[in-house]
Image (tube, helix red, strand yellow):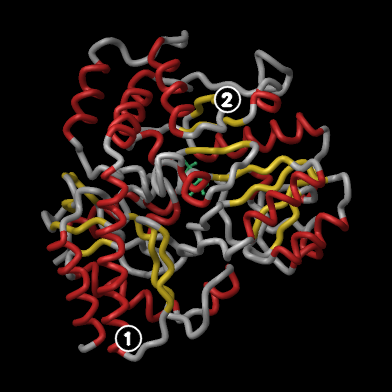
Amino acid sequence: MYSNSEILFSRAQQSIPGGVNSPVRAFKSVGGTPVFMKSAKGAYMTDADGKQYIDYINSWGPMILGHAYEPVTKAIVDKAAEGTSFGAPTELEIEMAELIKSMAPNVDLVRMVSSGTEACMSALRLARGYTGKNKFIKFEGCYHGHADAFLVKAGSGVATFNIQTVPGVTAGVSADTLTCAFNDLEALTQMVKLNQNEIAAIIIEPVAGNMGCIPPVPGYLEGIRALCDKEGIVLIFDEVMTGFRLAQGGAQEKLGINADLVTYGKVIGGGLPVGAFGGKKEIMQHIAPLGNVYQAGTLSGNPIAMMAGYTTLKILKDNPAIYQELEVMSSYLHQGLDDVLKAAQTPYVINRLGSMISVHFSEKPVRNFADAAAANNTLFNKFFHFLLDEGIYLPPSAFETWFLSAALVREDIDKTIDAARRFFSR
Ligand SMILES: *Cc1c(COP(=O)(O)O)cnc(C)c1O
């Protein structure tokens, strides 16, 4: 007997590469058949076989208010009736930009796009156009979407540039991408020194979320900020995950550090395809049509997408208690998992900031990609599948952050902790 997910997965592979439209959905890292979803409401998703899951992915972040949140879905439906795309400006786009500015005060101008990839790609182009320099620095294990320049496999520091690591990305493109270990200010300072006056930008996930959750060590981001100021480098915070999630003003507010440019995605679209980049007027005014750094999009600022994003952000802005509730639920989960793992006498590290959390089965602190890769990820995969069977949907990789939604209740967290306990006592 095959499950509906198994039947769908085998059918999907006949017409979609690998059966999925984004690779991480294929369960490659944990093994097994991806679960096909049919519907979702609040904290739960229902799969093609009718089984329900407590959701700790939340579409990789966007569904911070929970699935099919009534005010958001109603706003989308009402807006759709007024026409779905004009290719001309609308008032709603101004309201969206004003709302973003009110939540992230160092954003003077903001341009809407349709994905986090587009946001990061455009911010980098802008930083290069503004500074007239080509090189930029990213960090090993940080993800900034799939634009060519970012797809440089993080290797052993400076030596790795100029190597074609992802087929299809030319050596010419990756030659200007320098990679450095996350949380190592010393190595970064050295790299900047070696490339004096050649670096356009440093782009970073202020709280890394694409190698599990890895917060910055104290002083690290402050050090990067000072380095950028001293060397005239544009500091880009990729807040695609952290924006509007860690606080109204994202990581910038939560950690008290301002970037020069910020990129958004995920929460900003409330479940629809939206991204944005914004920042200081001095830099943003170089974007077309104000300036000559070209950037465009047929569906940028799409009314339905804007409505979903605007409604979500407005609810977050008007109800700051949501962030406190998320903190309470996340720390309750953190504490519960901590107790279970301690009792299980398994080496582990729980990293968390706000409603981003992850578990690494590691003996030592996890502060960068190498630490995350050295953890017992085979154990994570078993843990993942046990919880999946129990109706708890974690990200299908040890290198991904879990995201909590405001729809979760204590009972959901208790079930999760209990399942973790049973995994270790089986
Ligand atoms: C998801 C993500 C992106 C890419 O966003 P897409 O909308 O998937 O293109 C970029 N940066 C970070 C930090 C992300 O988590």
How many numbered dots are placed on residues in this image? 2
Position of residue 421 in the picture relative to residue 128 (left or right): left
Residue drawn at point x = 40 percent, y = 72 percent: 350
**The image quarter in which residue 347 lies:** bottom left
Separation of marks 1 and 2 at Cα, in angstroms: 47 Å
Image coords of residue 55 (percent x, y): 24, 56
Q: Position of residue 143 (x, y in %)?
A: 56, 52
User: In the image, which is nearer the foreground, mark 1 or mark 2?
Assistant: 2
Q: Return the residue at label 2.
A: 108
Q: Can you name the residue that lies furthest to the bottom here? A: 345
According to the image, label 1 marks what residue?
A: 342
Residue 197 is left or right of residue 170, and the answer is right
Position of residue 167 in the picture relative to residue 361 (left or right): right
**Callout 1 touching callout 2 (CB < 8 Å):** no
Are there few (<14), some (14-19), or many (20+) residues within 10 Å of tag 2? many
| Depicted 85 relative to depicted 21: above or below | above
Regarding mark 1 in the picture, which secondary structure is present there? helix
